[in-house]
Amino acid sequence: MSEIRDINFWQSGAMKIQWVKNNMSLLRSIEEEFLRDKPFAGLKVALSVHLEAKTAYLCKVLAAGGAKMYVTGSNPLSTQDDVAAALVHDGLEVYAWYNATDEEYHRHISRVIEAGPNIIIDDGGDLVNLIHSEYPELIPNVIGGCEETTTGILRLIAMNKQGSLKFPMVLVNDAKCKHFFDNRYGTGQSVWDGINRTTNLIVAGKNVVVAGYGWCGKGVAMRAKGLGASVIITEIDPVKALEAVMDGFKVMKMEEAAKLGDFFVTVTGCKDAITENSFMNMKDGAILCNAGHFDCEVDVAGLKKIATDTKKARNNIDGYKLSNGNWVYVLGEGRLVNLACGDGHPAEIMDMSFAIQALSAAYLVKNKGKLQDMIINVPDEVDREVAERKLKFWELEIDKLTDEQEKYLNSWQID
């Protein structure tokens, strides 16, 4: 029995889902194949991904393949209640609502696991962590799973090193068609969509501090530069720091960057990227947000402890007054700004990411019992297929190697 806010919201959600479907050509083609082949017939799929329209369409594509879907969100502030209602209206089981408490969020992901899934599709590792820690008796049902994001992959790698991971997980985030496009172009655009619609402030002429220069950080920095900002990067990796310098950005420690920044965006996948020492160095009016995963990159809990006053400055903007009299502002409670304050990545970007999810899930079923490793990279043929299909839908053609070129590239002898 689903747990959502109100089934009467379904028509609004259905319109959102239809809009993204119109712009997700890859998933439409996969849906047609799944309807024909039914790769998930008789199987249960548990999914915990940010529950908005693009995710909902992925759920419907998997259901078209015969899956019995059990759906929840991966962040309390990213669930859209009308989208959840639309899925329930279409016969899927959904346990999620916007602004869930910690207790409600845990109950919702528990209900999804209690269904006894055969495939797990995760974003951040909450489902995988829960089934291992609280429902180990259900692990034998699981064929395998797919992980959507960097934070979840880090958790999986840690589990695997300890020998704790008990079923195969495909590292969807590490696929080229995922991290090149989703993390760089998707995050780059959607983060600034969320910031701009929430603050209604200009970015041009401001100092933007980006914590972390991985693929997401590169996208956020690139778009900030395009909007006219001066960009500062903070990093712990010397190679990435050098790359940022050569890409034209300033690099410094966070405590120094804190004195200069007008906007701060964390994209590290780690905790405590911005803490008390940095808060106390910030300008009056500094704006902080997170585009990593969990709400611990900006230490909001620590900020609350040192604040002498708080206020709601605007929808999705909380103000904290410091002992020096300065106010700093946090967007979306420090949760993912592109989803807590926006609609997430563009549909065309998630088309590639979710195509990889769908094909990877089918790969797990096809190879049931044959996979020895617990950590599995997306097969190259899946990555190439997604890229080739996307080019085809964009009506673009590329060159192919001739037989002579193939021979040349694969031979050490020179004719």
Image (cartoon, rainbow, N blue to C red):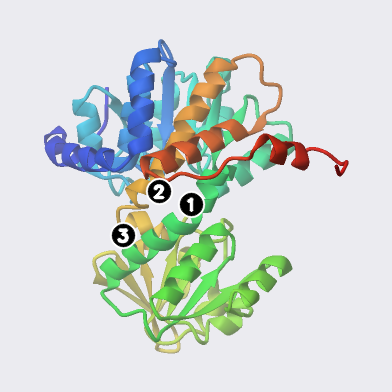
Instruction: Tell me where residue 201 sits by quadrant.
Output: bottom left
Disc 1 marks a residue whose amino acid type is Phe
| Inter-mark Cα distance, 1 to 2 | 7 Å
Q: Quadrant of the C terminus?
A: top right
Q: Along the line of sight, which residue is nearer the eye, 137 or 117?
A: 117
Mark closest to the chain's N terminus, 3 or 2: 3
Q: Residue at label 2?
A: 349
Q: Residue at label 3?
A: 341
Q: Name the outermost residue toward the right.
A: 413
Instruction: Tell me where residue 166 sits by quadrant.
Output: top right
Residue drawn at (41%, 10%), measured in percent from left and top? 42
Residue drawn at (66%, 16%), measured in percent from left and top? 370
Is 207 displayed left or right of 394 in the figure? right
Give the percent coordinates (x, y) of residue 193. Answer: 32, 63
Q: Is residue 240 visible?
A: yes
Residues at discs 1 and 2 in contact (Cβ within 8 Å): yes
Instruction: Tell me where residue 215 sits by quadrant.
Output: bottom right
Is 244 displayed left or right of 372 in the figure? left
Give the percent coordinates (x, y) of residue 111. Answer: 38, 27
Residue drawn at (77%, 41%), measured in percent from left and top? 408
> For the residues carrying marks 3 and 2, which lies nearer the camera in this image?
2
